[in-house]
Image (spheres, coloured by chain):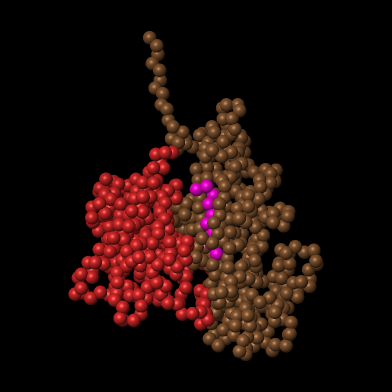
Chain colours: A brown, B red
Amino acid sequence: MSAPTPPTVSLSAPIFAKLTPHPFLLRTLRPSEPGAKPLRTNGRTPAETRPLRANPSSLSHAHGSALVRAGDTTVVCGVRGELLPVDRIPQFRPLPPRSATAAAATGDDGPQTIPDAAAAAGGAAIGRGELKDYDLLVPNIELATGSAPQFLPGVPPTTLAQTLSTRVCSLLHSTRMVDVEDLRVWYKPGGAGGGDSSGDGDVTMTTEGAHDAEGQEEEPERVVAYWVLYIDLLFVSFDGNPFDAAWAAVVAALRDTQLPAARWDPDREILVCSPADKRRLNIRGLPVACSAAVFLEKELSESGADAAEGRHWLLMDPDRSEETLCREVVTVVVDCSDGETRIKSIEKHGGTVIGRELMRGFVGVAEKRWREVKEVLKA
Amino acid sequence: MTDRRRINGPPGETIPPFFDDADRAPETAKGRFRPSNAIRKMFLKTGVTPSASGSAYLEISTSAKPGASGLKLSCSVHGPRSLPRSAPFSPHLVLTTHVKYAPFATRQRRGYLRDSSERDLSVHLETALRGAIIADRWPKSGVDIIVSILEGDQERETSRSQGDEVWEMMNALSGCITVAAAALADAGIDCVDTVAGGVAALVQDTDGDESQPSIVLDPVPSEHAKILAACCVAYLPTRDEVTNLWFRGDVPASDMELYNSLVEKGIQASRNANRVLVGCLTESVGEGDTS
């Protein structure tokens, strides 16, 4: 009499992945066969990112737009400019005329200054950060489009959506991507007089230094309005790593943005845009965000104070199922467009695994990612 | 009251760019490039949101620029799922529809809170789909249907577009119905038939009174001098049933013939859209078999 064999239940891999996601991912990362490569459940190696695809100018009503896909995460970004007259700004401080600031900016900088510093000095010479003070950049991220089952409309924005919007906003300000000069609308009284009413004769925000040579005007030129850039991001599909995709979409859309030339019409006292004359924004640099999640050998529930013990894996570009298994997430924003790598921002939260050494290595990974994204966005 | 959970921008109100139209030639109606009984080209694809139970994407080409697309809709279906504990017992599937314009979808920037026209579209969409779903197969459960209008069906020029919004809403509704039906089928929710939307309109092509109004399918407001009346129909072709009818405009009440023929043309437009819908669904089923 042979002992009754225990009933064997064979379950397919997707069912295991659903029932016990942590051991399943651990098992694929630590394969039992000696020669096998460690893989994630989605078939990528731990350091492999999803290919990014970008499709700029996909919308016709926005001034600039981009659709960015990374795997199953799809974001649409639309940038739309609207005008803010200075009399609607509560605490507006008038700027000195443009020629003076230009001289100040070029005067006190040496020839070897990088563009960043020159612009910063230009801003410092007048002593104000207009972009931030007047709220000229308005990014908002909408997740509640049915992009994933946990984001349903009809409720206020989730914590994740609010966090993402704030992160994008602060990064936009800290990277100084947008030049505030592009957003100013200048007006020189008297300069547009006479019968010359064509677009070139008027002082617009686009004519650079054409009128400052004479210096015999009785009234200096002044800023009459600012463009406010509404940057709206809509997630069509959400599969993890929302910040990288959203940031790439913001960068791609801003690089695509063309604002019409605006001028002040003193007779009608309105701001008039000309449909033909469009100008691209000067976007400084190409910051690229790169995120990774730390997957611990021990499950989140059982990991107590000694969470740093045991093995861990750095999973690049985590998808939705991996994000639920990892607590520690690191995001590095790098910009290598000056030839050398500049770290624009480092964010890390949720754990203690990543130390100084790992972070240094991760910046190298981010550089690689930067080159990939550059290829995609330049195309 | 401001929305404190979003980034609201400057406290002073911003104004959208105003274009000087004086130096531009006054635009006239562009005229229709396709026969009066043909609808515009459509692109429909299912499965754009893998994490949803079902999803679909619809693009309708615009007539103004060849290759450019007018209406872009993305729809995702979540469910059927169990109702929350607090919800009262329901013997049927509880259908929830959301239609939302993206902030960059139209000429004027839209806010993030739904306005009345979006709520109106949601109600119409719910009525249209309710007639198609076999709701008593899922008691005590609910399904959410979310349509995001990524790009509205509007011309970019603002010169002659006053009062066109309601006709554009009809076009948007017919697109919403078609894309939602595709997403429902993708989610595998039992329906009696595939429902599709169609629009027909009574238009006048020149401004003078001498021209006789004619009925066209799938009207584009910029192509015609004036739209007198329009009707949006949600239609089930194999059962020959209309699940939703939205009629709007100025037709003499005595002329029942005109009213009937307008609905008839709307049904014809819906049949055309249905052909695209069925083609897309069979294609996606065929892909599933081979892979």
In the displayed structure, B140 sits above or below A36; it is below
- Give the residues drawn in magenta, as a range: A64-72
Q: Which of B76 and A291 is in front in this view?
A: B76
- Which secondary structure class fits the magenta region best? strand
Left or right of B102 on screen, residue B140: left
Q: Quadrant of the C terminus of chain A?
A: bottom right
- The residue located at (20%, 70%) in the rendering is B257
Q: In which quarter of the image is the N terminus of chain A?
A: top left
Residue B229 is situated, as x and y percent measured from the top left of the image, at: 30, 72
Q: Is residue A372 visible?
A: yes
Which residue shows up at 67% across the image and 43% down it? A358
Q: Nearer the viewer, residue A368 or A123?
A: A368
Across and down, in percent, residue A193 comes to: 62, 88
Q: In this view, does A344 lie to the left or right of A271?
A: right
Tell me the quarter of the picture where residue B111 sits. Answer: bottom left
Residue B27, quarter of the rendered image:
bottom left
Residue B14 percent across, percent down from the top left: 52, 74
In front here: A15 or A42?
Answer: A42
- Can see residue B230? no
Front residue of A79 and A279 = A279
Q: Position of residue B245 (x, y in %)?
A: 27, 63
Number of marks in picture: 0
Relative to B131, is A103 on the left or the right? right
At a point 61% along the width and 28% down the height, the residue shown is A35
